[in-house]
């Protein structure tokens, strides 16, 4: 009862307090910059959590949404929505998977939920293999394959999921040898995002492919964070030259407009009503997603992600205090030693730079794929300065002293 009354007591509806938030109100955005209500300008090396693919408020994206909004924003999936086919054609071309089939939904969790469910419909099996430190979302099955018990509610617990050590080929082989014919699907991020920018090795992804083929299991590539061109290839799994059976995607797909999808191999046949959604694939979301793909192609943003990403990574590797700099394209992480634990908060408070994090000590960079060399240099300058200030404080040496 106190649950129901707490809002009434104060006579004010509160926000359900599930996020630790920075006290910053962003009111404007353009490209790789955002501005707060006090007029402060920030560099966004976080891409609003890997969502901003083509840059904030890109003019082509804004115009496409505005134009569509004036015509029709939504009608149900009970009628033809030709924009869905336009989107499918473009996605097939840009992703290099023309013969795949597209199912549209609204978020990354929903994409994975549908992928896991579709796999089970397809082969009639129940067991799912996922990996340590994986994050796949917060809906029922998506959270069940997420390796974080603190966000799995008792109702989401299922005996169907086994977590194997990430990148451990022997463990994967042994599990398949024992349970292969019962395994419905294997779900894996090409680069773990929330898990701390951990790259799936080529041979690990290739082994997943060959075992899934041999045993009739479905290979689900979670490309929600590492996909959509972020790593310089459309899906980060492409670096291993494998074709998954289902790719899930969301974040960068709409550049901030909510949309998710799965791209499904031609081997998996649809049946009416097996999947469905009210909002997925609506006119407005399709217009946003089409504009994103047009900009990715026209502005060669995957090439830019490779070029600027390689540059950033090589420069970060030169900073001796930062450890294990790693990543691909514009999905980069490095470990911050305990002595520099204030680095991320100082980048924000002193340099007005947003970055991402992963527990316990990783800084994650997930900027727009249109990040410029100047943006990268501004970030690097701030990073070098802050590392040297914090290191100097540690040793009680003035930061500008000749060493
Ligand atoms: C790899 C991965 N999969 C799935 C999700 C869930 O996406 P959403 O928050 O859109 O449901 C995320 C979100 O961070 C993610 O990083």
Image: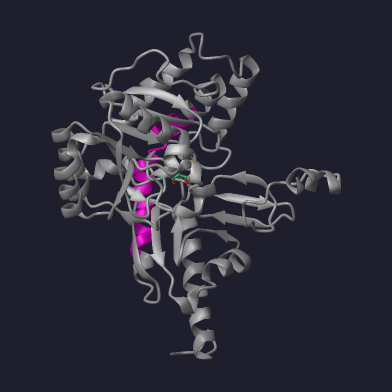
Determine if the magenta segment contains residue 273.
no
Q: Is residue 104 above or below residue 375?
A: above
Q: Nearer the viewer, residue 280 or 69?
A: 280
Q: Quadrant of residue 346?
A: bottom right
Residue at 47 percent of width and 47 percent of height: 50
- Residue 10 x, y percent position in the rendering: 85, 49
- Residue 313 x, y percent position in the rendering: 35, 61
Residue at 45 percent of width and 53 percent of height: 149
- Quadrant containing the N terminus is top right
- Quadrant containing the C terminus is bottom left
Q: Nearer the viewer, residue 311 or 183?
A: 183
Name the magenta segment's main secondary structure: helix
Q: Is residue 260 left or right of residue 169?
A: right
Which residue range is magenta in the image?
A: 291-314
Q: Quadrant of residue 101?
A: top left
Q: Nearer the viewer, residue 65 or 257?
A: 257
């Amino acid at each position: 009862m106190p649950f129901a009354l707490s809002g009434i007591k104060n006579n004010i509806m509160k926000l359900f307090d599930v996020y630790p938030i920075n006290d910053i109100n962003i009111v404007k955005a353009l490209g790789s910059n955002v501005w707060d209500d006090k007029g402060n300008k920030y560099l966004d090396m976080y891409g609003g959590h890997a969502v901003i693919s083509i840059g904030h408020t890109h003019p082509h994206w804004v115009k496409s949404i505005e134009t569509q909004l004036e015509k029709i924003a939504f009608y149900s999936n009970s009628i033809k929505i030709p924009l869905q086919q336009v989107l499918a054609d473009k996605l097939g071309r840009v992703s290099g998977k023309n013969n795949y089939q597209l199912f549209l939904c609204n978020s990354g969790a929903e994409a994975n939920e549908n992928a896991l469910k579709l796999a089970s419909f397809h082969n009639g099996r129940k067991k799912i293999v996922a990996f340590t430190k994986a994050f796949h979302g917060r809906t029922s099955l998506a959270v069940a394959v997420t390796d974080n018990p603190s966000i799995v509610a008792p109702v989401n617990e299922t005996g169907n999921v086994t977590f194997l050590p990430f990148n451990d080929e022997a463990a994967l082989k042994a599990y398949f040898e024992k349970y292969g014919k019962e395994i419905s699907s294997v779900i894996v991020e090409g680069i773990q995002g929330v898990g701390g920018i951990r790259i799936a090795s080529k041979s690990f992804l290739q082994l997943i492919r060959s075992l899934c083929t041999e045993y009739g299991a479905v290979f689900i590539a979670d490309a929600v964070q590492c996909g959509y061109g972020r790593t310089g290839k459309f899906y980060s799994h492409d670096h291993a030259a494998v074709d998954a059976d289902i790719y899930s995607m969301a974040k960068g797909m709409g550049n901030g407009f909510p949309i998710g999808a799965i791209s499904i191999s031609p081997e998996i046949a649809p049946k009416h009503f097996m999947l469905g959604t009210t909002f997925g694939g609506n006119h407005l979301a399709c217009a946003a997603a089409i504009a994103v793909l047009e900009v990715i192609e026209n502005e060669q943003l995957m090439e830019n992600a490779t070029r600027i990403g390689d540059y950033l990574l090589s420069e970060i590797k030169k900073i001796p205090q930062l450890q294990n700099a790693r990543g691909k394209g514009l999905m980069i992480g490095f470990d911050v030693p305990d002595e520099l634990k204030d680095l991320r908060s100082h980048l924000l408070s002193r340099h007005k730079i947003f970055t991402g994090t992963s527990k316990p000590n990783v800084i994650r960079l997930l900027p727009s794929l249109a990040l410029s060399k100047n943006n990268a240099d501004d970030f690097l300058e701030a990073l070098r300065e802050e590392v040297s200030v914090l290191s100097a404080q540690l040793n009680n040496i003035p930061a500008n002293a000749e060493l």
